[in-house]
Amino acid sequence: MAYETENIWQNISPEEEKEIQDFAKDYAEFMDENRTEREFIRSTVEKLQQEGFVDLAEVNNLEEGSKVYTTNQEGALLAAIIGQEPLSQGLNLVGAHVDAPRIDLKPRPLFAEKELGFFTTHYYGGIRKYQWVTLPLALHGVVVKEDGSKINIAVGMEAEDPVFYITDLLPHFAAEQREKKLKEAIKAEQLNVLVGSRPADDDEETEENNSDKDKDLASVKKALLQLIEERHGITEEDLISAELQLVPAQKSRDVGLDNTLIGSYAHDDRICSYTALRALTSMETGSKTAAIILVDREEVGSMGTTGMQSRFFENVLARLIAKSSSDYNDLMLREALENSTALSGDVTAGFDPDFAEIASKNNTPYLNHGINMTPYTGARGKGGASEASAEFRSKIRRIWNNNGVAWQATEMGEVDKGGGGTIAKFLANYNISVLDCGPAVLSMHSPFEIASKADLYHTYLAYKSYLEN
Ligand SMILES: [Zn+2]
């Protein structure tokens, strides 16, 4: 009669243990290779192609079993397996976001001060700034030159690469900083990234054009510009049409002694994006069309062309319908939207004994207890959240129970102490029944988040069983 959840590792079979460990290994590799949204989407496309999915633009007629994908500016992606029923009967959709908190370069990043060269930055998403200093960082992203040609940048993840670094004050002189509030101890404008210290060799032009006073300033910056030009063919103006991000250079690692936990940058929310991808590529064709949508910009409100609030999703759905039937009309799209259901894959806050004071009474997410069914997010009196209906919760509970999925029903934390949002409410705007669900993590939004390998695997099972049913 009572509802209880169990630790997945307890009495686990050797077969399941192996599946979990193998899955976690693949995941860690994918995470280390893909540090930005663009990289993640590009690799997702590669994986889809390997699994027989084709670009929607290259398909004229869709039929049962067709496997297609389409992307939006390397920031969002939709992939689908066409089901037996017509698309107007709706999709089984899993949505997740591929963006993660990080530190972006400003449009004019490079400066030098007292013979040290820096990139000045603008952080993205909800970071705790003090966590990002004195940490090896990698620089990833894309630079688009004036002629439209693209240069991909990825420096810092390989052992032989240099890394980048934001300094902090030494404790000996931090008396004043120590007394500041945590959120004020490191200011956004102090998040300058060290990129060099070698002055340019003297040449006559420099001597003439600069006063003695700022000679050294100009000299280190000049040397860095020369180096960037030589090494990457990039000018200072090229950096304006660029998306360059500093991400933790630390690769994923097992955490602890017993092979249960995995530490990585950006579990939030690539853990849901990756499991959604694996679920779709390993499932059989279902009665409904199964689809995953991966989007960018969730951490900043889901705005922008590649965010969940963009029309990308319904445009693609319209295209899918038009390619599945000869008599497309707008009502078919409206019906397809209304008859769809969705899981909004996103992480939640796992119970941390060191911060037990934020836990939600009797509703706390525990690591190793499986995917979380989170009927609503938001803050205070459920402000700003959609809520999954009792009927939809029942349906998902049934599917998961019938398919051996470890799951737990939870809230993110104590009601008065905070909250959060996901892409669920934007899917709900289409009148799609949607439920938030994902694994719990520790130290969410930090440069190195902790998740459970068992939860990772059961999140995959949860998405797969939903997409198939
Ligand atoms: Zn998230």
Image (cartoon, helix red, strand yellow):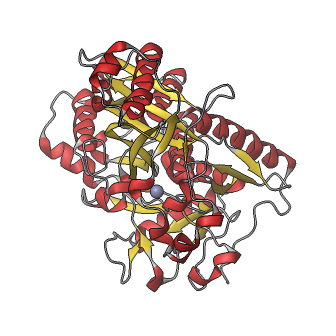
Q: Closer to the camera, 101 or 11?
A: 101
- Kindly identify the residue that appears in the image at 46 percent across and 49 percent down: 100
Q: On the image, which quarter does residue 223 sit in?
A: top left
279 sits to left or right of 18: left
Horizontal side, residue 241 vs residue 55: left or right:
left
Q: Is residue 382 above or below residue 311?
A: below
Q: Which residue is drawn at 50% across and 24% down?
A: 46
| Residue at screen point 27% across, 36% down | 316
**189 lies left or right of 11:** left
Residue 3 is situated, as x and y percent measured from the top left of the image, at 65, 79
**Is 407 rendered above or below residue 231?**
below
Which percent across, then down, holds residue 62? 33, 26
Q: Is residue 376 visible?
A: no
The quadrant holding residue 431 is bottom left
Q: Is residue 442 visible?
A: yes
Would residue 6 appear left or right of 139 to someone viewing this image? Answer: right
